Image: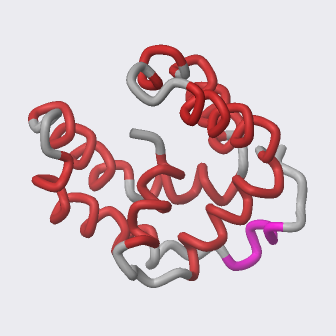
Amino acid sequence: MHLTSVFSWGATKGWKMSNMQAAMDITAKFCQKEMEEYGACVASNPSSWQEQCHHLKVKVAQCTSSHPVIRKIRADCAGEFAEFERCLRENQSSAQACSTHVARFLTCANTVDIKGLVNPESQPT
């Protein structure tokens, strides 16, 4: 699972929005084309989207991972994110089993100091 997917999932669960919102705003602003292509692929392939759209999911991840805010969150919360990904691999049929892992990651992400890094209006490097 990619970082922006985790943020989106957290938003649906009512998690604090400061850093999550920044990550989603970055994705929406700088990766809109990639997100739209991925979304269209998923919608067009309801039973096989995981295979059919994987290359587009990778493009979204590559786009978002180049932004300094995303890189900072990934670096500061690498352990929590790794535990979450491990849980997902071990519980492929039930992502809900990993809700405590994603909660730990999102809690960490919301404590990362992103002030002064860049604002969501800035281009990624």
Q: Toward the viewer: 61 or 107?
A: 61
Which residue is located at x 74 percent, y 67 percent?
117
Q: Main secondary structure of the magenta part?
A: loop
Percent position of residue 12, x then y? 41, 71
Quadrant for the C terminus in the image:
top right
Q: Toward the viewer: 116 or 30?
A: 30
Taking 19 as reference, is 120 left or right?
Answer: right
Is residue 119 on the magenta stretch?
yes
Against 47, residue 73 (above or below) is below
Percent position of residue 100, x then y? 16, 65
Percent position of residue 51, x then y? 44, 15
Percent position of residue 79, x then y? 28, 50
Taking 42 as reference, is 119 left or right?
Answer: right
Which residue is located at x 33 percent, y 50 percent?
81
Against 58, residue 107 (above or below) is below
Is residue 18 on the magenta stretch?
no
Which residue is located at x 67 percent, y 44 percent?
64
Quadrant for the N terminus in the image:
top left
| Start-end of magenta stretch | 115-120
Against 60, residue 59 (above or below) is above
Q: Quadrant of residue 15?
A: bottom left
Taking 22 as reference, is 15 left or right?
Answer: left
* Count of numbered circles in the view: 0
Taking 3 as reference, is 91 left or right?
Answer: left
Which residue is located at x 66 percent, y 27 percent?
59
